[in-house]
Every structure is written in C-alpha cells, then in structure tokens.
Amino acid sequence: MVPKGTENKPVAWRQGPDQATMPADQRPPNVIFILADDLGFNDVSLNGGGVAGVVKTPHIDSIAQQGVDLTNGYSGNATCAPSRAALMTGRYPTRFGFEYTPTPVGFSRLVGTFRTPGALHPPHFNRDEAKDMPPIDELAVPASEVTIAEVLKTRGYHTVHLGKWHLGGAKGSRPEEQGFDESLGFTQGAAMFLPENDPGVVNSKQDFDPIDKFLWANLPYAVQYNGQPMMKARGFMTDYLSDEAIKSIKANKNRPFFMYLAYNAPHTPLQATKADYDALPQIKDHRLRVYGAMIRNLDNNIGRVLQALKDQGLSDNTLVVFTSDNGGAHYVGLPQINSPYRGWKATFFEGGVRVPYYMKWPKGLPAGAKFSSPVGHIDMFATAAGAAGAPMPTDRPIDGVNLIPHLTGKNPARPHEALFWRSGDYRMVRAGDWKLQVLTMPDGQPEKLWLFDLAADPTEQKNLAAANLAKVAELKALLANRDKGNLKPTWPSLLRGA
C-alpha cells in the first residue's frame, strides 16, 4: 500500500521548566504505562525462554526483576480496544457499552466468511447489523468517561500519549481530547511499521490468512500529532515511537509526567528491521524469525526508554508498568507464543487474557518480588492515581484498586474477590482459583461451559463443569450480578459471539 500522509515533520514537544521546583525524588512519581500489542505470554524470556527459545528480553525482564512480577496478571479483555478502555478508565468497559473492538465492516465480513481453526464456534457475519453501523471513528469510549490522564492532570502532571489509541477517532474521543496534553500516534487499531518496499524492512505475509491480506492492503504508515494532518513516521515504527518518547522524557524531566507508550508491536503485519532479522540466523523458519526480530526490537527500544529515565535521574521515582493488551494471536501461525497456556487472543482461556504484567518503582515498591493474587488492567488506573496522590472519581464505580498497599505488604487481603470479562455471548469470571467460561450458543443450542481449578490445573486441561454443577451455579450467579451493572453495547458486534 502507498503510505498515507505527508513527509515526517519533527515534533516540538512542549518543554517543562528549565529548573525543577524540587528534587526528582521528592516530586510525585512520574508514571509510564508501556503497552505491547498482542504479545504472547511466552514471548517474554522471563516467562519461558522467549521466541524459539533464543530471543531474550532482558529489558522487559528487568522491570519485573527490579520491581514486582504480577504472576496472575490479566488483561482487561481478550481483544485490543476493550482492554485499553479498561486500563484507561479503571472500569469494566461493559459499564459504558464499550464491549467490542471496533473493526471496519469489511474486516468483520472477512472474519465471518473464513472459519478459524479451533474457534469456539463457526463465526457468523451479521449482515443486517452492518447496515446501521456508525462510522468506525465514532465507535469510541464516551467522552463522559474519566481517563487516568485526566485524573493525573489534577495533580499537575503533564500527560503524553504515543502510539496506538484504538478508543475512538471522532471529535471528542481522541487522546488529546481525553486528558492528554500531547499525543503522537494513530487512532486506528494497527499501522505499518515501514512501507512494504522499504529497503530496510523484512516482511512476512500470511498467505493463508485473508485478514492479513486485508491489513497489508489497507493500513497506513502514518502518525499524527495532536490531531494535525497525518504524516509519515520516521523509520521503523517501534524505533520512531521510542525516539519520540525519549525526547518527551527529556522535555519533561523537571516536572511530573504521565506517559502512555502504546506500541503496536508485535501486532500484525509482521515486519522487522533487516538488522534485527539478520541478528537471528539461528531461527530457520522465516515467519518465526521475523516475529522474533520484532520482539528483539521491542525489547531493545524499551531498554532505551528505561536508560533515558536513568540518564535524566528519574529512574528511582518513576512508576513503570509493562503489560500487553491481550495474549498472542492465533492468526500469526506460531503455536508456542502463549505457552504453557491454552488459547489465544479473542478467547478467555488463559492464553488469551493471562499476560506479562510488571511494575517497577524503586522508591515505592519492593524489588524482585512476585505477587500471585489475581489482578487486572483495571487496577492500573487506581494504582497510578494512588502513587501520584491524585483524587479518584467519586461519581461512578471504579472497579480497579490501588495495588501498592498489596504489593508492599501493608494490605494482606486479596485485591479482588472476583474478576470479570464479557464479549457479547461469551463471559468469564475468576474467583479465587476457580474460573468459569460461559458461551451462549446461537439458535437455541445448549450453552458451553468450561470450569477449571487453576491451582490444580493452570493450563486448563480438565473441564470440571459437568462434575461440579454447584460451583458452576455459584460462579454464574456472580456473572449475573455483574451483568446488572452493564450498559447495552453502544454498537452491535458484527460477528455472533465475538
């Protein structure tokens, strides 16, 4: 595809004060959310060896090693946009009708035409619903929702977004209108990393996947700053976003800042720099090598961002949170990316929602700790607000909790009695070690149930639903009670059960 947008223009990041009003270690902590896109649990070497057992992620690993590894960390949903809505608002996105990932009608039609191997049931495209779908930019988090950026601004934070947004592109829903002083990135769900014919890129197209063909044909290689005209990025997208993040860190070194660094790696299309690809000759499969090179590049860039904090004397008093929006996707055709867990992106099996989730704050959190109670992306909002001393909204329920007292041992209780997920006819609850998935089937077919004791069966191999109807009923009652607080989805899913 011909890249969209004008030639790249340097971003003039707004400069903070020339001198700090107080030492960095006495200010409210800086907060950085680093979000990967479709990163598999096993892609992080701390969790099992990395891609092909050879691609290490020392910089991502260091966030856990120098902070806390949330070993039962869950994404806000099994797909991109609702998960991002959860971490931005601290609320289950079903509370405000943001239940589905916004996708173009043509994309949904493709998904509904081609059956995915291992799908829970054959996808069905709802043609009648498509006639009344609003434009994709209007499929957005309501402007009435309060984002963590808006909360931190009440404490004087300068707020910056870089990368993928995917929470709306229409007026009122863009990042610079949802609490961010500055935003550099794109509002859609994916972007090219480089033009397909760039001499410095190595591509891996999935010829077996029509969805991948849709992406290659339609995605731009472009970003925009604060709603200005689209322009080309400068170099490989992950490199470019990191370059600009480092510039923003330097610009804001003398004032508290919040940065939401939302990479689009390693989401498709699979593209790597030639340098990263050439560094992995031991991986013989081309697709796996490109994917591994993307992970290598992502980790190196996160290392650069962490080094920038250190260089500016900010590392000790910066809360860094690293995670992924959901598990790895089946459509990249790499079966080990979520190992040892079962399932993929778009499913509520552990492989779809159990994600790397690490927090580092030398001044406020222990180093080298592990925390095993179930927690979710909904907790990032309250944790950041708690670290900053910012007031929480009082006019609406906030589902997440401030994890800092739990991670430091001041509060020995579990943060949550239960955590919930929903996407249309597909629901899940985790309460303690018990996990129930419920799939309501179309056309009067019996519902599907999966019940697992994750303490005994963390990889979900033994379905206990038929043998433990009392536990099923107990957990279904929790789901029904949670559903009472949900709004009707703002737009319909064009895929039955999606």
Image (cartoon, rainbow, N blue to C red):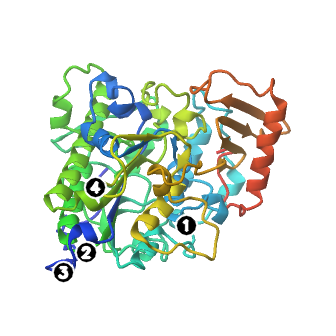
CB of mark 4 within 8 Å of CB of mark 1? no
- Disc 4 or 2, which lies upstream in sequence? 4
Amino acid, disc 2: Arg
Q: Residues within 10 Å of mark 1 (few under 14, many from 20)?
A: many
CB of mark 1 within 8 Å of CB of mark 3? no
Residue 255's label in the rendered image is 2
Q: Which residue is mark 1?
A: 141
The front one of 277 and 378 is: 378
Spatial separation of the CA atoms under disc 4 and disc 1 = 28 Å
- Disc 4 or 1, which lies upstream in sequence? 4
Q: Position of residue 432 (x, y in %)?
A: 65, 40
CB of mark 3 within 8 Å of CB of mark 2? yes
Left-right relation of 27 to 150 = left
Q: Which residue is mark 4?
A: 3
The front one of 132 and 8 is: 8
Left-right relation of 174 to 378 = left
Left-right relation of 324 to 1 = right
CB of mark 4 within 8 Å of CB of mark 3? no
Spatial separation of the CA atoms under disc 4 and disc 3 = 37 Å
Amino acid, disc 4: Pro
- Disc 3 or 2, which lies upstream in sequence? 3
Q: Does dot 2 land on a helix, a strand or a loop?
A: loop
Residue at (56, 58) in percent of width and height = 400
Q: Does any portion of residue 227 appear in the rendered image?
A: yes
Q: Nearer the viewer, mark 4 or mark 2?
A: 2
